[in-house]
Structures are given as C-alpha cells and as structure tokens.
Image (cartoon, rainbow, N blue to C red):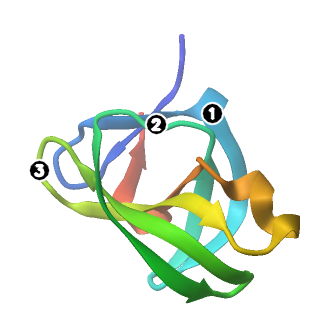
Amino acid sequence: DRRLYSCNNCFNPVALSDDLISKAFLAASGRAFLFKHAMNVKIGYKVDKELLTGRFTVADIYCAKCGEVLGWKYVRAHDPTQAYKEGKYVIERTKLVKK
C-alpha cells in the first residue's frame, strides 16, 4: 500500500511518498517538498534562476491532467555543493493532497 501525493486541483497522482526526500524546501507560496521522482507531470522550458540556495537551471512542472503549475525540476546546479538537487522535483505543499 503506497501512499500518493496528488494534484490538489484534479487529484491526479504526481508523486509517491517513498520518493519524498525533504519537507524543508520553500517556494513562493510557502512550504514545498523535494522528491526523487514525479509522475504524470509535464516539464516546461529550462530557465536559469537565482533561488535561495544559489543559481540553478530549472524547469516548471505542470500536472499532466489539468495543467496546474505544481513546482519545478532542478535541471542543473551552478554551484557544485548543490548538485545533489539535479534531476529532483520540488512541489509546492499547497498544490498537493496526500492520499
């Protein structure tokens, strides 16, 4: 019995609780979670952004069912000490419901 995190807008499953790395991330809306993997999402265009922990190449992620922006994917860390985030997904807590 695997627990799921789903889109708060349409209840499409987007992440497994087994893939949750951290609940200690921040996004514009407040708390956010870092996941190893995400599912049923579309990945937007890559852009360089200055975030709280440095400069990154990121891509917005969208719910594949309803199109809601859920968070972002770390594509590349410009600081080697932040490289562990590469390929991981940040999803805003307000965009999720746990099932």
Q: Mark 1 or mark 3: which comes first in sequence?
A: 1
Which quadrant does the N terminus fall into? top right
Vertical side of 41 occupied by 78: above or below: below
Vertical side of 43 occupied by 38: above or below: above
Q: Mark 2 or mark 3: which comes first in sequence?
A: 2
Residue under numbered circle 3:
66
- Residue 57 placement (x, y as % from top left): 53, 70
Check the image and name the residue furthest to the left: 66
- Residue 80 placement (x, y as % from top left): 84, 66
- In this rendered view, identify the residue nearer to me: 39 or 50: 50
Vertical side of 38 occupied by 72: above or below: below
- Residue 82 placement (x, y as % from top left): 80, 66
The amino acid type, in three-letter code, at marker 1 is Asp
- As measured in the structure, the alpha-carbon distance from the residue carrying label 2 to the one carrying label 3 is 16 Å
Q: Going 62% across and 39% down the picture, which residue do you hit? A: 36
The amino acid type, in three-letter code, at marker 2 is Ala
User: Badge 2: how crowded within 10 Å, few (<14), some, or many (20+)?
Assistant: many
- In this rendered view, identify the residue nearer to me: 68 or 76: 76
**Please, what secondary structure does the residue beneath circle 3 have?**
loop
Asked if the residue under mark 2 is in contact with the one under mark 1, i.e. CB atoms within 8 Å, the reply is yes
The amino acid type, in three-letter code, at marker 3 is Cys
Number of numbered discs: 3
**Horizontally, is 46 left or right of 3 in the view?**
left
Which quadrant does the C terminus fall into? top left
User: Badge 1: how crowded within 10 Å, few (<14), some, or many (20+)?
Assistant: some
**Please, what secondary structure does the residue beneath circle 1 have?**
helix
Residue under numbered circle 2:
15
Q: Going 88% across and 67% down the picture, which residue do you hit? A: 81
**Please, what secondary structure does the residue beneath circle 2 have?**
strand
Residue under numbered circle 1:
19
Q: Going 26% across and 55% down the picture, which residue do you hit? A: 62
